[in-house]
Amino acid sequence: MEASRDGIEIARRTHPSIAMDQRRAPIELLLARRCIERDIPFLGICRGSQVLNVACGGSLYQDVDQELASRASETAVCHMDYDNYDGHRHPVRVLPGTPLREWFAESLGGEEGDEIMVNSYHHQGVRRLAERFVPMAFAPDGLVEGFYDPDAYSPGQGKFLVGLQFHPERMRKTGSDEFDYPGCAKAYRDFVRAVVAYEAKLAAAAAVPVRGRWAATMPKLSHGMEKHRKVLVRSFSLAKNMYFGGGDTQKPAAEAERQDLDAGAEFLETAALSSQQEKRLKQMGATVRNASGYLNSTLKVSEDREAAARALMAKMSAAQLSSLAAFYRAMGAICADLLDAKLHPASPTLHE
C-alpha cells in the first residue's frame, strides 16, 4: 500500500508483533475497488480506512510515531499503546458539517466543544488523503482520523463511503458494555441504513421483467443462431422436467412430438450423462435441484444406457454432428466473452 522498503523495514523493527503479510494488501485493495466501482456501501475501520484511502489514490505513513516525530512536543500523540489496547485514548478535533459531527453532536456541546477522545492502536495512517475524500477529524499531530466522500454519502439512498481510523465499537466504558459516546452506535446505524437501502435498490432492479431488462443489452443473434438458442433453451427445459419427474423417463405431454426436437434436445431426452458430466453436475449443485435431492435421484449412469447414447449419436449424420459441435463451441465462446467482461469490467486505473 505504497510502502517503501525502508518504511516497511522501520515498521518491522519498531513493531515486531505486527504481521507484515504482503499477500493480504492486494486482496483487500481489490475488494475495496470492487465496492467502489459498484457503489456498494463501505465503512472502513482502522486498517480498513487505510485500504480505502489507498484504493482511491491516497498514500500512507508506514510508521506514524517515527514519521510524525518532528512535530512539536505539545502536539505529539501516542497512536499505539501495546499495554492498553482498548483503554488508550487520545483527542481528535471533529470538523463541522460532516457525518462524524452529526453522529457525535450531543457530545460536542458548545462552539468550542469540538473534541472527543478516541481509542487508537495503529502504526500506519493517512499521509495524503485521496482527492475524492473530505476529512472529518484530525488528531493534534495533524493525522487524519476520519474522512468521507460527500458525493457518495446518503444512507437513505444506499450511499456510504466512510473511513474511520478509530474503532467506535470498542470505545466502551471500563467494565461495561456502555459506549463512551452515543455517537459510537450511530455510525454503525447509518451504515446499516445504507446497506438496507442498497439491497432494496438491487431487489427493485431484479424485479424488472427479464425480457425488458435483456432487450437493451443482449447481443443480436443471426437467424440460424437464434434457432439454435431456442433449441438449447427447450433442451434444458426438457431436462429439467425429467429431473423433477422423480426418475420418470417418460416425456411430459407437452413434449410428446419428437420430431419437433433438434438433435441436441433428442440427445438430452434419451441419453444418459457421462460419469464426468454427472460429477460436474453434482459439483454445480445439480443446477435444478439441491445437492441432497440430486444424490437421491435416478440419474445414475449405467453401461447399457451409455451404450444406447453412443448408438443414438452414431445414427446422426456428419452434418448433424458438425452442426451440434459448432453450436456448442459458439455458445462456449459467447459465455467465455461475457464471463470475462463481468469478471474484468473496464474501469479507470487506480494507482497505489
Image: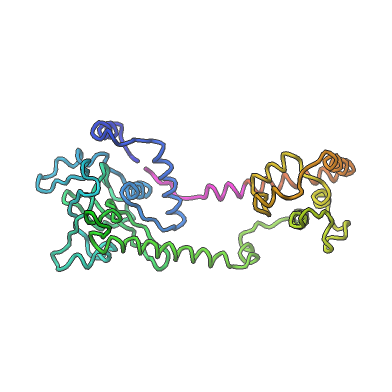
- Residue 111: where, in percent of width, then height? 14, 67
Residue at image coords 82%, 46%: 271
Give residue 8's position: percent from left, percent from top.
Answer: 29, 34
Magenta-span inclusion, residue 120: no
Q: Nearer the viewer, residue 266 or 130?
A: 266
- Residue 223 can be seen in this image: no
In the figure, 93 relative to 66: above or below? Answer: below
Foreground of the two, 6 or 296: 296
Q: Quadrant of residue 102?
A: bottom left
Residue 209 is left or right of residue 221, and the answer is left
Segment tinted magenta in the rendering: 337-352
Q: Quadrant of the C terminus?
A: top left
Q: Which image quarter is the N terminus in?
A: top left
Residue 24 falls left or right of residue 326? left
Q: Residue at x 20, y 65 (%)?
A: 107
Q: How is the image coloured?
A: rainbow
Image location (x, y in percent) of residue 119: 23, 51
Name which residue lies at 16% across and 46% down. 77
How far across and how far down the image is residue 171, in percent?
25, 55
- Asked where in the image residue 277 lies, by quadrant, the reply is top right
